[in-house]
């Protein structure tokens, strides 16, 4: 009998990485503009956004990747067989007759 080996397939998402990088670059550019480190009318904010996009794309391609296989499904619980022990326990005298309802008349015994 031979054992079959499963080769893991890696899932990379370069478009998502580039989008996240662009958003991060935009955030950095806005912080630098707000702190008066760079001017709004220059090319520097655009460069920050593009550098962020390139870094995000590079991280998506060369960073750690996820497995493409879905997680194993949890085993379904087996249905339990119905028991009649609960019905027998209801018929037992528990000493609280005043508050128990009589099943046939609906009377509570008071």
Image (cartoon, rainbow, N blue to C red):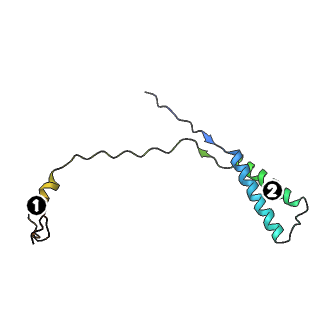
* Residue 6 x %, y %: 53, 35
* Residue 80 x %, y %: 25, 47
**Is residue 6 left or right of 17 when viewed as pictured?**
left
Point out the image quarter for the N terminus. Answer: top left
Q: Residues within 10 Å of mark 1 (few under 14, many from 20)?
A: few
- Residue 59 appearing in the image: no
Circle 1: element type: loop
Q: Is residue 84 above or below residue 31?
A: above
Q: What residue is disc 2 on?
A: 49
Q: Nearer the viewer, residue 3 or 9?
A: 9
Q: Nearer the viewer, residue 17 or 43?
A: 43
Point out the image quarter for the C terminus. Answer: bottom left
Residue farthest toward the top in the current orientation of the protein: 1
* Residue 97 x %, y %: 9, 69
Q: What residue is disc 1 on?
A: 105
* Residue 40 x %, y %: 87, 64
Quarter of the rendering containing residue 68: top right
Q: Residue at x 15, y 54 (%)?
A: 85
- Residue 92 appearing in the image: yes
Q: Residue at x 71, y 54 (%)?
A: 20
Q: Residue at x 67, y 45 (%)?
A: 13
Q: Is residue 107 above or below residue 23?
A: below
Circle 2: element type: helix
Q: Nearer the viewer, residue 80 or 12?
A: 80
Residue farthest toward the right in the current orientation of the protein: 42
């Amino acid at each position: 009998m031979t054992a079959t080996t499963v080769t893991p397939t890696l899932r990379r998402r370069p478009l998502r990485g580039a989008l996240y990088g662009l958003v991060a670059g935009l955030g950095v550019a806005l912080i630098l503009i707000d702190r008066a480190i760079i001017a709004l009318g220059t090319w520097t904010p655009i460069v920050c956004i593009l550098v962020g996009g390139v870094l995000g794309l590079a991280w998506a391609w060369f960073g750690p990747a996820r497995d493409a296989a879905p997680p194993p499904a949890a085993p379904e619980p087996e249905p339990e067989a119905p028991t009649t022990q609960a019905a027998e326990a209801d018929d037992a005298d528990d000493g609280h007759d005043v508050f128990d309802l009589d099943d046939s008349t609906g009377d509570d015994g008071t």
